[in-house]
Amino acid sequence: MIVYTLRRLGSALLLTAVVTCATFLLIFRDGPSIARAILGEQATQETVDARAVELGLDQPVFSQYWQWLRDLSGGSLGHSFFTGEDVTSMLATRVPVTLIITGVVVLLMGLISVLVGTAAAVKGGWIDRVLQFFAVLGSAVPAFIVAVLLVLTVAVGWGLLPATGYVQPERDLGGWARSLVLPVLAILIGSVGSAAQQFRGAVSDILQQDFVRTLRSRGIGEGRIVFGHVLRSAAAPGLTILGLQTIGMLGGVVLIERVFALPGIGDLAVEMALRADIPVVMGCVLFAVLVVVVVNLVTDVVGAWLNPKVRIS
Amino acid sequence: MDLIASRRRTGAVVAALAVGAAFLTACTSAAPTAEGGPRTLTLGVSGEAQSFDPARQQSAGDQRWRWHATFDTLLHCEEDGSVVPGAAESYELSPDATRLTMRLREGMTFSDGSPVDAAAAKASIAHMRDSGGSDAGRVANMEITTPDELTVVIDAPQPTGQLPTFMCFAPGAIAHPDQLASGAVASAPYSSGPYELDPSGTTTGSVYRMVKRDDYWDAGNYAYDVIELVTMPEPTARLNALMSGEIDGAIIEQEQVPEAESAGLHVLSNPAAWNGLYLNDRAGEVIPALGDVRVRRAINMVFDREAIAEYTMRGEAVPTTQIFHPEATAYLPELDERYPFDVEAARALMAEAGYADGFEVEVPSESGGSAVMNPIVVQQLGLLNIEVTEVPLTGPTALSDILGGRFPIFFARIGTGDSLFDIVQSLEPGSIWNVMDTEDPDLQPLLDRAQFVQGDEAVEVYQQINEYIVDQAWFAPWVADNSFFAVTGADLVPEMTDQFRVTPYLRDFE
């Protein structure tokens, strides 16, 4: 298990290097253009050229990437071209917002998917049909449309919850909870049906297998079969589904953060990518890569722990 | 047994829902405004915040609020572009417009108690000049001296009639000299302005809470005890926040106006920009045809300005052939009749100039900007056999490509200020928006005079300049369109006194 984990970490490092290098090449433009974007239309060309040199943007792109890697190895993500802020500090205020939203959504999605998916697979009938309907509906309606509808009805129309903004939990716990409800719902509504349907498929497949028939023939109750054997076997594909949904959700969170004016990392990444603020964009990409790596690692390790068939010796 | 278990489960779900509902209800009513508490104004800001470094600030738009709250400016610009005292109680521009002398008020202090004096003003202007800031070009090569502790003198290398105006902008912001030197001004500035940053209520990049300074010399003109500036780049989020009453005011988009008004919001609408074509290659260096004034006039005649104002701009614009907005002193109503929509006459002009077969030209295409209007350009210039190719521009290099003079023609929406501001912005050789550095010996004497003439004589010169560039078809303006600022009540901003007419000053909120 330790060797396996170390190998996964090694591949994660390689993935990080490849993705960050590709991002650097994609976002990089010629130095004076970036300096012009930073300083604005009123800046003189001399000032623009001087700023490009000051920021090291006159160096070859691979030299700049190498410098970024060296800074990273020293624990520094650099400073924003625009605000001058330390990128680590910027991420420190943004990452928790994104992580909390995705974390709550994943938790609820996992819980609801398992409950509804299992019920649909075991009971069938109307539960299954309703699930199929909502899975298609959820996939058909984009999260930002759901977000706008929720805002217009729940926030603007009924005044029950805030339409925008994020409240720090240490300042107002109730306000914090309220500020999360609609963003979480907007993402959840679009993704939970699909996740539950996929989990239903996994459970349904397990229920068809020979060992389940054998268990039934021995007179073991349906509850014990489902909760003691089937769910454990369905855990691995279920976790894979959840992992993929979590990674896919990062893209959706960007839109949700903008619609709800949440100060998360997605919103920051969009704004700064448009301005070619390379240090900030690289910081955001590094965060996204880390999320992907951690989610995959956790999925594999927990899946192996839950299901002896995929356990790695 | 199963029935009982089922009922228990149903009961548990109902109880959980009830607890959740009670929690939400409790939360909903958990934040009432305290009776007699501070008057708070909450505004939505459309862009990511820069640092507080004065050299990084923008002189127009809603991002000004943050630094306007924090830094006093030496002078103040009124709605008509006139300049009145600010931190400087008086000023004098020399007759040749090369020296500006400002006398500061006595007794002003920063929020740390240190004096706001000539040394601080000098350090601030020099910081903008030397640190490559957003408005560095406006004070480039200027010398600053302080004959005494309350007098600041700026000497410009050439006549600069806009010098007092620049002191209303970011170059006139007064920051603490020690903080400028140490860099501390970027994150935790001492205030010279009407408000100071409240770190305990601020989340960097998201919400900035400003608390009023009662010891500010003009505190009486600021109605609110607390101002909260909330970063909201997405127009939809700003409108939603306005409609739900979470913010009191914000810039909105043209297409949002009907929804805002139907939701009971009050929308302030003002002409703030002109839309149309920059015909940059007036010397014909890249496209010889554009060097012929008849071709430029023909281009002006193939656009149906009234239709564009009515349909493309949804009636929130007025047709014009001028780059000066209708309330500017340079504006002349009769010039709007100069280029009627007449395709046949335009074709005749092209033929007369020897370009009946047209020419090819590349125009930039930016998403959300020129990309929206370029179909009109392609179609209408096609009537003159001018073949237009769109060049997509994305990201931060777009501005550099456009200002670098790469395109002989492009569509633009350009914000306008007072007449001299627009002249300096677009007509001078070396002006930012004179991207191919057109020099015209017939126009230059007027441009030179515009820098120092005053009063009626200034109006006369500005109008002569306007007449000349319309006659010479330096541009092909289509319409002057409006900007929109929505507030939760009409009495919140009785009057918008900002010369750019995009966002109110903080002191306009009542």
Image (cartoon, coloured by chain):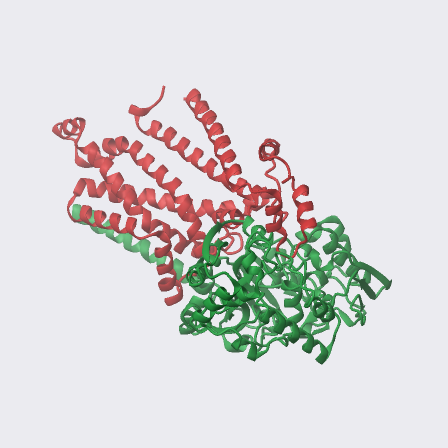
Chain colours: A red, B green
- Name the quadrant of the C terminus of chain B: bottom right
Q: Residue B482 versus residue B335: which sits nearer the camera?
A: B335
Quadrant for the N terminus of chain B, please: top left
Q: Is residue A132 left or right of residue B436?
A: left
| Residue B18 drawn above or below residue A78 | below
Res B189 seen here: no
Residue B200 drawn at (x, y percent): 61, 56
In this image, B148 relative to A31: left or right?
right
Nearest the viewer among A62 and B374 is B374
Q: Residue at x 45, y 26 (%)?
A: A11
**In terms of depth relative to the viewer, which is nearer, B20 or A70?**
A70
The residue under the point 50% across, 68% down is B349
Q: For the view shown, which residue lies furthest in the right direction?
A: B147
Q: Residue B505 location in percent, x, y?
A: 61, 70
Q: Is residue A216 above or below residue B234?
A: above
Query: Count of labels shown?
Result: 0
From the top left corner, tell me how far across and down residue B281 is, in percent.
58, 58
In the rendered structure, the answer to whether residue A68 lies left or right of residue A230 reads right
For the residue pair B50 and B136, the one nearer the viewer reads as: B136
Residue A237 appearing in the image: yes
Image quadrant where residue A112 sits: top left
